[in-house]
Image: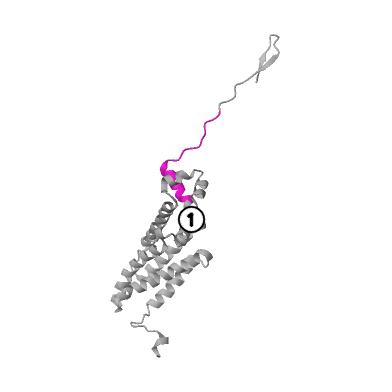
Amino acid sequence: MADVPGSDGTAGRRRAVPAAAPKPSSRVRMSAAQRREQLISIARQIFAERGFDATSIEEVASRAKVSKPVVYEHFGGKEGLYAVVVDREVRALLDRITTALTAGHPRELLEQAALALLTYIEEETSGFRVLVRDSPVLSAAGNFSSVMNDVAHQVEHILGAEFKSRGYDPKLAELYSQALVGMVALTGRWWLEVRKPRKETVAAHLVNLAWSGLSHLEAKPGLITVRGR
């Protein structure tokens, strides 16, 4: 209230000053596309933490501060949301690995593939956890195994040419590519939890084991325990 001068020059009764109007809310509404990205990001984290079965639409909606119908509107349900998250991770990992395969020498290609996978695990840990967790049957075509199969097919073409040039049976390239990629993939899953030694060291040892073996292949290997029979 402000002082109002009286007739004798002294301060009289204080006059009320109108209260300031409340400021409009500064919260900005998300567009449909922004909300969708937010929900995918939140779901990715929860799926990584708890897996598909233990994740609920209620928790996704709660963390996003929206109602459940908003999540259903965008994805139709938990299965639809999970499928989107997994599809993104599959494409991201496959793109990362295929982009890394630029060398001309097979050993360097193996190094690049191993390091690309370990770098993905290091930088996109939540995404990798989503891929390697148990997934519902409906997403069997989009998971870590499918990514590794795609990579193995690329490695198969490289090994096939290498085998042919060295006089080995190129038909065995598929077997060896699955073995090599499987070795790197399983080691990656182990390294996800321990994170020691550093990724460059892990990649170097993987390549050492794989390449030293490949460089001394027997044309027609046999099992020692069977040879004496």
Q: Is residue 66 above or below residue 3?
A: below
Quadrant position of residue 101: bottom left
Q: Residue at x 40, y 57 (%)?
A: 92
Check the image and name the residue furthest to the bottom.
228
Mark 1: amino acid:
Phe
Number of other residues with Cα within 10 Å of mark 1, as a class: few under 14, some 14 to 19, many 20 or more: many
- Residue 161 lies, in percent from the top left, at 29, 72
Decide whether residue 68 is among the magenta residues: no
Instruction: Depth check: give the residue in front, 190 or 205.
Output: 190
Tell me which segment is drawn in magenta. 22-42
- Residue 118 lies, in percent from the top left, at 45, 64
Q: Is residue 107 above or below residue 42?
A: below
Check the image and name the residue furthest to the top.
7
- Residue 58 lies, in percent from the top left, at 51, 48
Q: Residue at x 52, y 49 (%)?
A: 59
Q: Which residue is mark 1?
A: 47
